[in-house]
Image (tube, helix red, strand yellow):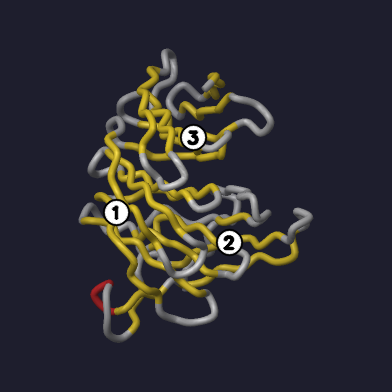
C-alpha cells in the first residue's frame, strides 16, 4: 500500500484560490492536492493516482510518476512526470477519468511546476533549464520553450507583475537563483542570474505576498534569505 504524500509539501495559491501539491517523483505516482473555494476556505483534500497512456502517449492506461502538478477550478491538471533522468513529458489530466492526455515535452528530470494565470514554468534538474509555456486551463498547452538557468534547478515560483510574469528559479548546485521575466505568451523578456552569498543549496523559493521580494530556503545553511526582485 502506498503511503500518502504530504498535501503541504509544496503548495501554491494561484489566482483562482486553489492549492496544488504533489510528490517530487520516485515510485509513488499519486498526485495530491487540496481544493479551495474562492474565499480561500478549504473544503476537501484528496490524493489521486495520475495515470497516463501506456508509453506516455497512447494505448491502455498505466501509472506514471508525477513530479509536480497545477490545477484549475474545473479539476484539469497539468502534470510533469519525473522519469529518472529521461526527457520529461507534459500531461493534462482530468481527475474524473483515469487517463491523461500528452500535450508536450519538458527537459530532463523535471522537479516542479508553477503557473500564474495562463503562464507556466517547470524546473528541469537534469538539463539545467526551465520549460515555459502557456496553458488555457483546459487541454491546450502552447508556446513551449526551454530557458537556460543554473545547475540543478529545483524550486520555482511565479507571479504576475503588471503585464508580465516574474518567475524565480532556485538552482541548488549553483547557489544562485534565476529571475526570469516572461510576457503573456511565455516569451522571455529577461533572464538574470543572482548569486546568493551565504545560501548553500537553495532548493525552495516563494514570492512574498504583497511585496517585490522573494524568500529562498538554504538547506545546508539551515536558513532563509529574502531578496528584492
Q: Residue furthest left?
A: 86
What percent of the width, then of the height, locates residue 88? 28, 57
Along the viewing direction, whichever of 134 and 86 lies nearer the viewer: 134
Badge 1 marks a residue whose secondary structure is strand
Say if mark 1 contacts mark 2, CB within 8 Å.
no
Which residue in the protein does label 2 denote?
Answer: 33
Along the viewing direction, whichever of 150 and 181 lies nearer the viewer: 181
Q: Which mark is residue 166?
A: 3
Which residue in the protein does label 1 denote?
Answer: 106
Q: Residue furthest top?
A: 197
Name the residue at 65% across, 55% down: 16
Badge 3 marks a residue whose secondary structure is strand
Horizontal side of residue 98 vs 227, given as left or right: left
Name the residue at 30% across, 36% down: 152
Name the residue at 35% across, 23% down: 193
Along the viewing direction, whichever of 153 and 122 lies nearer the viewer: 122
What percent of the width, then of the height, locates residue 2? 47, 69
Closer to the eye: label 2 or 3: 3
Which is more N-terminal, label 3 or label 2? 2
Closer to the eye: label 3 or 1: 3
Hey, which quadrant is residue 79 in on the image? bottom left
Which is more N-terminal, label 2 or label 1? 2
Horizontal side of residue 55 vs 168, given as left or right: left
Amino acid at each position: 500500500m502506498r503511503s500518502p504524500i504530504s498535501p503541504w509539501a509544496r503548495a501554491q495559491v494561484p489566482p483562482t484560490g486553489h492549492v496544488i501539491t504533489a510528490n517530487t517523483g520516485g515510485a509513488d505516482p499519486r498526485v495530491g492536492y487540496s481544493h479551495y473555494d474562492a474565499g480561500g476556505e478549504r473544503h476537501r483534500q484528496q490524493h489521486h493516482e495520475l495515470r497516463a497512456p501506456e508509453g506516455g502517449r497512447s494505448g491502455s492506461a498505466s501509472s506514471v510518476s508525477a513530479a509536480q502538478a497545477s490545477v484549475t477550478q474545473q479539476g484539469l491538471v497539468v502534470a510533469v512526470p519525473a522519469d529518472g533522468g529521461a526527457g520529461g513529458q507534459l500531461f493534462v489530466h482530468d481527475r474524473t477519468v483515469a487517463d491523461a492526455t500528452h500535450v508536450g515535452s519538458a527537459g530532463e528530470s523535471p522537479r516542479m511546476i508553477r503557473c500564474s494565470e495562463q503562464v507556466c514554468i517547470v524546473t528541469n534538474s537534469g538539463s539545467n533549464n526551465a520549460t515555459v509555456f502557456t496553458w488555457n486551463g483546459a487541454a491546450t498547452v502552447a508556446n513551449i520553450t526551454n530557458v537556460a538557468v543554473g545547475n540543478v534547478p529545483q524550486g520555482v515560483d511565479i507571479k504576475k507583475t503588471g503585464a508580465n510574469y516574474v518567475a524565480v528559479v532556485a538552482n541548488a548546485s549553483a547557489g544562485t537563483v534565476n529571475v526570469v521575466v516572461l510576457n503573456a505568451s511565455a516569451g522571455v523578456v529577461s533572464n538574470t542570474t543572482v548569486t546568493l552569498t551565504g545560501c548553500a543549496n537553495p532548493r525552495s523559493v516563494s514570492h512574498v505576498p504583497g511585496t517585490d521580494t522573494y524568500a529562498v530556503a538554504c538547506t545546508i545553511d539551515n536558513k532563509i534569505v529574502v531578496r528584492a526582485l
